[in-house]
Image: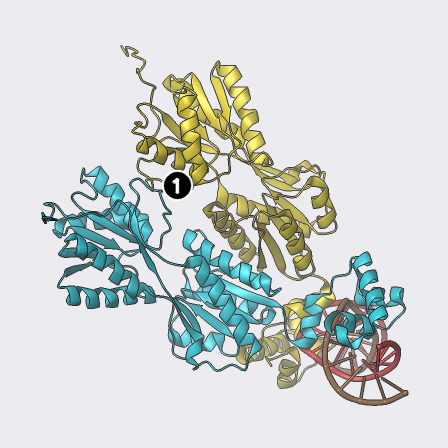
Chain colours: A yellow, B cyan, C brown, D red
Amino acid sequence: MAVTIKDVAARADVSVSTVSRAFTMPGLVREPTRRRVLDIAREMGYQPNRAARGLVTSKTGNIGLVVPDLANPFFGAVLKGAHVRAREADYLVFLANTEESPRMEEELIRAMVKQVDGIVLASSRMTDEQLEQVLSGTPTVLLNRRVPGVPAVLMDSADGVRQAVEHLAALGHRRIAFLGGPRTSWSNRERRRGLRAVTRQLGVEAVELGPFAPQFEAGLQAADLSLAADVTAVLAFNDLMALGVLNRLSQRGVAVPAELSVVGFDNIAMSGMTTPPLTTVDMPMQLSGRAGVDLLLELLARPVDGADPRFQRMLGTQLLVRSSTAPPRPAPVRARR
Amino acid sequence: MAVTIKDVAARADVSVSTVSRAFTMPGLVREPTRRRVLDIAREMGYQPNRAARGLVTSKTGNIGLVVPDLANPFFGAVLKGAHVRAREADYLVFLANTEESPRMEEELIRAMVKQVDGIVLASSRMTDEQLEQVLSGTPTVLLNRRVPGVPAVLMDSADGVRQAVEHLAALGHRRIAFLGGPRTSWSNRERRRGLRAVTRQLGVEAVELGPFAPQFEAGLQAADLSLAADVTAVLAFNDLMALGVLNRLSQRGVAVPAELSVVGFDNIAMSGMTTPPLTTVDMPMQLSGRAGVDLLLELLARPVDGADPRFQRMLGTQLLVRSSTAPPRPAPVRARR
DNA sequence: ATGAAAGCGCTAACAG
DNA sequence: CTGTTAGCGCTTTCAT
């Protein structure tokens, strides 16, 4: 048995309430008493039992983090950002991996809801209705998912697509393939929305392929489809797919970027980690995790008003140009002076 | 306030103990009563409060998972394996990211020790003494770290090195560079041990470079050192470094594997994800997470005997040969018939 | 400023 | 088989 508040009280010759107050309401305890209690507590290695405290305060000091797939480096980064922010506020975090399954998701949320003050839910696979039901009563922040009235942190995928397409158009590309991700993904819908807007505006032709699983293997398949589609550039749903495309193209002896330019999404394949380096839309993954927890903490502190627009945060994305993109062949010869 | 055991008891017109028993000791409740209670409980959406339960049973139903860096995909995989196993036993998991800092590590462990039944600690950066002190009294399983008397799941790095070197030797390589990882890393010590044994046995010459940070950037630097060291093959501490090496070599126009063969470690750069594909020692990361939790659960179930050799588990590793290795140039011309 | 007492939700003897 | 009681470690009235 560890050392309890009772032990400290006995040793300091005060009541348990005084010890409790010394920790949680220092103002209510006379200076010398407080010092003595705190000293003794430290000396004895006393750590308040948060579970017991939670029982009476109904604040656990924990938050829950739910992600679809821990093996995906994207979510590792999100977790990292979230955890750092949680620690800053002295929160501990519960982790839940749903294996992309809505049922798991629901089960896990139910299991941990009693032990957390709030939940950050990344890329949920549940329907809006399921979500609202499971989460009713628990402060929640959604990551990359928009549900009316639910606080969320979103990444501006549509703008990322705009940047990528503008880049390609500036290079002279006029026909671009888009390799779509899962149909249920909010991000994917956003990207397609952005794609349609920008291609219309720039007079560029977009060929929408897919949907594909957002994985390396799907990229292999998508590469062949892209070649057959007679485009000069490919914009993939994420880096994993883009890597697959690159791999398949090199297999088929197609030169990148001379014969086909490739753009990824999310910057998982960080600078230089691939050969050749991949032009990609950088998603602020770590930041999104941090922002999610940040928002949740605000929610926990203030009276909740889910409809308040301040509770919908949009994070910017940024195109990182590397050597996997270039003007299409034949290069547009444009005298410079 | 959520629905409590009291509410269920009232609604079912039984005492709270009966409700409690219906859940935890079904044998002690008469069949019809039990059914009625359970039905009503489900109907009311009752979920036992684990924290309250833990207060009296001193079993929380939670385990803690501590890793040095969530952004490293290696640990993502470990987490995944661990979480899956934990869920099978109906445990919830607390997550701690230590940012490679021993101080953080200690602080986090202290913070969550009261809310968990045991801890799985991956690649700890603490000293043996710190570890023993912080963890005394808490069932713990170490991952990739050996401390006398503490249960652990280890990966057979030494054997991985053996396989890699035998592979290279069979191809005809006689002088191989080893790019070392952090000096404090148990894995690194194991690899060097394996290296020395196998090179002596095979009459191969090993050039030990480093220590390096286990990152992509260090690989860039290590590539130059390797070229200067006049070796025909390089064995890197991990895939991240190996990727850096590949990148730098291509920058300097050195052909892989014709002029230099490269072998990674840990299979983070999964099949085909790099160009060219990387020969690597596959570490069972996901499995190690699962095995860690598995061992911990055993510890929680039985009387603890840390010295028992059954509580030290070694997982095998396996060399995956891909096109980044080949015979050194000039190729050993060996008439085949 | 401090102590005594009640109670958070639950389980575990102890009676019946 | 079921109900009553005590108490896990802590905070929070309510007194003093």
| Left or right for A336, reference B129 | left
Pick the residue in front: B55 or B316: B316
| Left or right for B2, reference A141 | right
Q: Is residue B183 visible?
A: no
| Left or right for B101, reference B173 | right
Indicate whether B317 appears above or below B302: above
Q: Find residue B57 and report its image quarter.
A: bottom right
Label 1: which secondary element: loop
Indicate whether B41 appears above or below A203: below
Residue positioned 69% across, 56% down in the render: A110
Q: Find residue A54 and report its image quarter.
A: bottom right
Pick the residue in front: A35 or B332: B332
Q: Is residue B163 visible?
A: yes
Residue A289 in the image, given as x and y percentages of width and height: 54, 47
Residue B233 in the image, given as x and y percentages of width and height: 18, 51
Indicate whether D1 appears above or below A253: below
Name the amino acid, label 1: Ala
Residue positioned 63% across, 51% down in the render: A105
If the image is split into quadrants, where does the N terminus of chain B sit? Answer: bottom right
Q: In the displayed orientation, state which residue is furthest to the front.
A: B337
How many C-alpha atoms fall within 10 Å of the one at disc 1: few (<14), some, or many (≥20)? Answer: many
Indicate whether B264 appears above or below A126: below
Residue positioned 31% across, 39% down in the render: B275
Residue A69 in the image, given as x and y percentages of width and height: 53, 49
Residue at label 1? Answer: A269
Pick the residue in front: A25 or A89: A89
- The total of numbered circles placed on residues is 1
Residue B46 in the image, given as x and y percentages of width and height: 77, 61
Instruction: Chain letter for mark 1, please.
Output: A
